[in-house]
Image (cartoon, grey):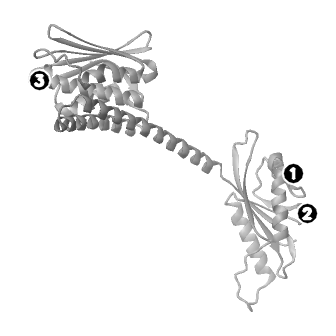
Amino acid sequence: MGVGIIDSTRPGDARSPHADIAQGRGLLRALRNTGITVFYQTPDLKVVWGQNIPENWLDGRIEGKVDRDFLPASVASWISDRKRAVLETGISDSVEFRDGEDQSRWYDMWIDADFSDEGVLQGVITTVVEITERKHREQTLRTLLREVSHRSKNLLAIIQSIATQTGRYSTTIEGFLDRFRGRLHSLSFSQDLVTSSDWRGATLSELVGTQVMRFRGDEDHSVRFEGADVYLNPNAALHIGLALHELVVNSMSHGALARHDGRVHLHSELAKDGDVLILLWSERTVGLLSPIKRFGSVALERVVPLSLDGTATVEYVDGQLDYRLEIPSANFEIEQLSHG
């Protein structure tokens, strides 16, 4: 039997057999510390020795066995064929295969022919490394990339819808740009919350604070939020954030927030045993609101509720504006929090 040993001597150097044996022992000891599986087979593919053999391969005892005795039946035959090809050509090869009852373990295998100093074929050296964790990381990365691609497409669709509707209800380029920038900023603030949570979403209270704070400042208490807090999924966070943006902007132009002492009441509650979240925005307005159906009304009454598979109503009676948004539970998780 021949075992490949690294020869660090130069031509002409004297080297004792004891040095070779010591080096071989050192290499095998180092190999035990790596977890890398190595086994040596004769030209007829019988195992002579092995190191770090996985326990699920005949309890780690494979000496005298051939590939079909310890490798998965689904791969043993073609791996043996690859080894025979290496023995015939002398060209190294590598394969990837799965093992385990549920095929959950992954391995990389390298196959090398072993020749004596005189060029005589002595056997085949097989090196195996488990790559299960790497495969799981790759799968996780692929899943994340698909998720990012999916969410990016959704975000672009929302932006396209905002641009289209803003353009439809704008009479000048300047007006369009001003409103479009504001809505994009609102979207970006909501997106920041979603991203910082690893794409889980955002709490309703965080969303309210973010959308109000960008206009009113940290110390402003003109918009009071109370009631049930929930954790909104990413789609709900983006669309409810847009609704809050429209409500704040509208109020600053035509409603309570146009006055220095104006106040808005924002209340949330769970209904139907937690299957629906009701969000109610209430304020006293300054003068009559324009009856023209501009983008703000379209977003609040159509775009947002349709995106959440919910419903919405806007009522204006005797200077009192009430916006009611009903959000199905598929859009949120219930948090043990309340605000008031």
Marks 3/1: CA–CA distance = 81 Å
The earlier-in-sequence mark between 2 and 1 is 2
State which mark lies toward you, 3 or 1.
3
Residue 65 against residue 144 in the figure, above or below: below
Q: Label 2's element?
A: loop
Quadrant including the C terminus = top left
Q: Label 3's element?
A: helix
The 10 Å Cα crowd at callout 1, few under 14, some 14 to 19, many 20 or more, is some
Residue 123 visible in the current orientation: no
Camera-side residue of 24 and 282: 282
Residue corresponding to mark 1: 68
Q: Is residue 339 left or right of residue 177?
A: right
The earlier-in-sequence mark between 3 and 1 is 1
Quadrant including the N terminus = bottom right
Marks 2/1: CA–CA distance = 13 Å
Residue corresponding to mark 3: 258
Residue 79 against residue 283 in the figure, above or below: below
- What label does residue 291 carry, if any? none
Marks 3/2: CA–CA distance = 90 Å
- Residue 87 appears at what percent x and percent y? 84, 68
The earlier-in-sequence mark between 3 and 2 is 2
Residue 90 against residue 255 in the figure, above or below: below
Camera-side residue of 240 and 70: 240
